[in-house]
Image (cartoon, rainbow, N blue to C red):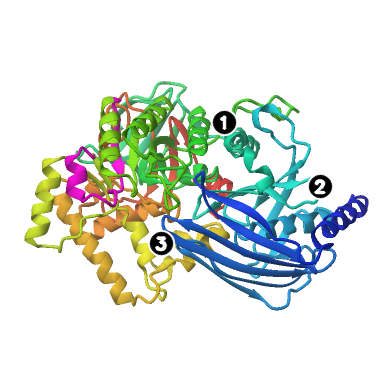
């Protein structure tokens, strides 16, 4: 097959190379860059004399991000040298230098998703060299996989001018790249930056953007559905867990040994093993020596891709609150995960390519609709410049099934008030950042219900902190501190992540490298320790005063960072059971779902985890997931880790 394809690929190369290099001094090409659907910058690139030169630059919330890259290659696209320096996202630097590429078979030079023009050359290398099953990247050693797919089209219209490819493992997860069929330049790309949705369009195809996102979101879901066909549950909807220690998160004493009977996805009975009789024919799973807890909640997530689903479940997270993802992406993922795992296909038949629904594994998703003020520095594509626009945004999110509104930095005061009032009138609550023009107290007095991140800056033990705490308690304000993300970003470069998040060793390699490069710059270990210690003192004071604390991660290691968040609460001096409740019962109450989940009680949704050990005695045992039960379906974690690209 490779021998048949090679002449065609070489011909395609000839057409492409002629088109791009025939005119000396030809103007640069460009790709318009979008983060969360908001146009933020451009990649300017040229290819001349078999050398790609790229300047990748955008503005992310008033922060300039820039990356300069040079890639020299031979006539068959074999890389000769590679230099790439700058940043691909605010906290992720790139500093790759390959003075002389190895030239080894099926090897290409690239470091991360940018420049996207280089990913086009990667695909052309793949085509020219007979579509090898894998390609090894230099200098990282990561192994990527490329496939050409049947191109989906907006509003059902065919797109004969585009060829559609997916690439796995340049970043964590699956990217989508459309090449112009005529000269094989990048026309459209869907990838992730900082594990959030990131897009690029050649100006010739930029008019497709408004309709393209919603249509193409289903395409990767359908491919992922086929990938996840083998992830069958260990028990399906009706079963009993027997012999374990039940930590029900109600605040009561553990029950040991206990039985939890699940029927049709709901908890039917829970109690001591002697008090609960398992009906004949109900499958039983012996969990003696293990602890059974409610499924965990991540109350500050940014879910930008399919791979988050199985990784979340593998780490025990059964509910997430997305705090401002791209509208079409998060609604598609929410709906696919709500439908649950894919039914097995009929014998000898694969799911049809145009299947209208996707059935995937992932946690329940609750959504906070992001709204920012307009301007080049705004975050996301949903903005409001005045109260009327603010009310319209709330109505759109409400109609789409969002539970909350998320405020962001550039909203002015009248628009902020309109969003808060409209959200409350619609039965939604309000969370997010404090807009730049407002003080925290002012936003809370206007009706803001939750505050994202630890915005309390008063000195631990001070009268000012006591006064702030009294104010927050009076207004029943909820805080999600995201300490684990602050710890990771603020750590000293001398401190390896594995020293406080051991499971980072199992993370997909591209994500692991990005995280390793994110740190507090010149901060010493002592300075980093002092900063996080101060935050821990503040969180402990908030908790002791009765301020609701909900566990969230922002980004970090999906799922895994939530366990670290819980552990940090214990390091702060919060009891293990209260730290666990911050990721179970308290979020359920905050989101109005205490009668549905968050604890282990009869009648509630069967979202459960089984862990080896006893996290009440050693909180790190919360990481040792033996089983996870999502909406009544029980899974072992190892296949889920693998499905998300992590090593079990």
Please check the rendered image and state whether residue 431 is part of the magenta-colored stretch, yes or no: yes
Q: Residue at x 21, y 37 (%)?
A: 447
- Image location (x, y in percent) of residue 191: 59, 50
N-term-proximal mark, 3 vs 2: 2
- Which label is found at residue 322? none
The quarter holding residue 607 reads top left
Q: Which residue is mark 2?
A: 182
Q: Residue at x 65, y 28 (%)?
A: 155
What is the distance, in whole Å, between disc 1 and disc 3 at their CAs? 31 Å
> Closer to the observer: label 3 or label 2?
2
Q: Nearer the viewer, residue 333 or 226?
A: 333
Magenta residue span: 426-448
Residue at position x 39%, y 36% in the image: 367
What secondary structure is found at the residue carrying circle 3? loop
Q: Image quadrant of residue 218?
A: top right
Q: Is residue 522 visible?
A: yes
Check whether the beta carbons of the residues at disc 1 and disc 3 lie within 8 A of each other: no
- Would you place residue 358 above or below residue 110 in this image? above
Q: Would you identify the image quadrant in which residue 394 lies?
A: top left
Label 1 environment density (alpha carbons within 10 Å; few <14, some 14–19, many ≥20): many
218 or 232, which lies in front? 218
To which residue does mark 1 refer?
A: 359
Marks 2 and 1 close (CB-CB < 8 Å)? no
Residue 512, given in percent of the width and then of the height, sits at 52, 62
Q: Earlier in the sequence, mark 1 or mark 3?
A: 1
| Alpha carbons under labels 2 and 1: distance apart | 35 Å
Q: Residues within 10 Å of mark 3 (few under 14, many from 20)?
A: some
In reply to whether residue 265 is colored magenta, the answer given is no
The percent position of residue 177, horizontal first and vertical second, equals: 68, 48
Q: Is the C-beta separation of discs 3 and 2 under 8 Å?
A: no
The image's mark for residue 501 is 3
Q: Identify which residue, 520 or 541, lies in the foreground.
A: 520
């Amino acid at each position: 097959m490779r021998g048949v394809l090679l002449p065609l690929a070489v011909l395609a190369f000839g057409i492409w190379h002629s088109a791009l290099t025939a005119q000396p001094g030809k103007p640069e090409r460009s790709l318009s860059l979008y983060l969360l659907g908001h146009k933020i910058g451009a990649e300017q690139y040229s290819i001349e004399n078999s050398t790609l030169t790229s300047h990748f630059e955008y503005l992310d919330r008033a922060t300039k991000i820039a990356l300069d890259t040079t890639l020299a290659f031979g006539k068959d696209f074999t890389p000769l040298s590679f230099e790439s320096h700058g940043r691909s996202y605010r906290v992720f630097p790139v500093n790759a230098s390959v003075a002389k590429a190895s030239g080894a078979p099926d090897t290409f030079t690239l470091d991360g998703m940018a420049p996207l023009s280089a990913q086009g050359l990667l695909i052309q290398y793949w085509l020219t060299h007979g579509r090898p099953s894998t390609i090894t990247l230099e200098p990282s050693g990561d192994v990527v996989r490329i496939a050409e797919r049947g191109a989906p089209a907006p509003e059902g219209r065919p797109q004969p001018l585009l060829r559609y490819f997916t690439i796995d493992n340049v970043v964590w997860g699956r990217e989508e790249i459309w090449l112009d069929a005529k000269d094989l330049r990048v026309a459209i790309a869907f990838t992730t930056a900082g594990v959030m949705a990131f897009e690029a369009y050649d100006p010739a195809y930029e008019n497709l953007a408004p309709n393209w996102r919603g249509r193409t979101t289903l395409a990767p879901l359908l491919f992922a559905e086929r990938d996840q066909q083998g992830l069958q549950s260990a028990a399906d909807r009706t079963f009993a867990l027997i012999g374990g220690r039940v930590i029900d998160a109600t605040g009561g004493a553990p029950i040991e040994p206990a039985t939890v009977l699940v029927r049709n996805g709901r908890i039917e009975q829970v109690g001591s093993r002697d008090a609960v009789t398992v009906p004949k024919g109900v499958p039983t799973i012996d969990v003696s020596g293990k602890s059974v807890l409610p499924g965990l909640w991540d109350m500050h997530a940014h879910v930008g891709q399919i791979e988050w689903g199985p990784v979340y479940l593998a780490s025990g997270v059964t509910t997430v609150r997305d705090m401002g993802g791209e509208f079409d992406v998060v609604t598609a993922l929410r709906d696919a995960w709500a439908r649950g795992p894919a039914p097995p296909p009929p014998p000898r038949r694969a799911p049809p390519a145009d299947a209208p629904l996707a059935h995937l594994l992932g946690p329940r998703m609750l959504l906070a609709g992001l709204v920012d003020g307009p301007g080049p520095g705004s975050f996301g594509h949903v903005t409001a410049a005045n109260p009327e626009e603010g009310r319209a945004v709330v109505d759109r999110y409400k109609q789409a099934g969002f539970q909350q509104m998320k405020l962001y930095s550039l909203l002015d005061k009248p628009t902020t008030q309109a969003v808060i009032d409209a959200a409350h009138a619609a039965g939604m609550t309000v969370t997010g950042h404090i807009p730049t023009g407002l003080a925290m107290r002012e936003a809370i007095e206007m009706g803001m219900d939750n505050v994202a991140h630890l915005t309390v800056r008063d000195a631990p033990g001070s009268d000012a902190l006591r006064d702030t705490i009294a104010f927050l308690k009076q207004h029943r304000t909820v805080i999600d501190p995201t300490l684990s993300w602050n710890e990771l970003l603020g750590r000293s470069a001398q401190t390896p992540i594995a020293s406080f998040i051991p499971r980072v060793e199992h993370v997909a390699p591209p994500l692991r490298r990005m995280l390793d490069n994110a740190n507090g710059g010149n901060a010493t270990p002592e300075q980093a320790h002092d900063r996080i210690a101060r935050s821990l003192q503040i969180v402990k004071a908030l908790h002791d005063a009765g301020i609701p604390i909900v566990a969230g991660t922002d980004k970090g290691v999906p799922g895994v960072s939530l366990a670290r968040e819980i552990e940090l609460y214990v390091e702060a001096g919060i009891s293990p059971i209260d730290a666990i409740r911050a990721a179970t019962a308290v979020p359920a109450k905050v989101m109005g779902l205490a009668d549905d989940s968050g604890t282990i009680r009869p009648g509630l949704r069967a979202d459960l985890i089984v862990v080896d050990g006893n996290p009440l005695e050693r909180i790190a045992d919360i990481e040792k997931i033996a089983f996870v039960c999502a909406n009544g379906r029980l899974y072992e974690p190892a296949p889920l880790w693998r499905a998300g690209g992590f090593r079990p």
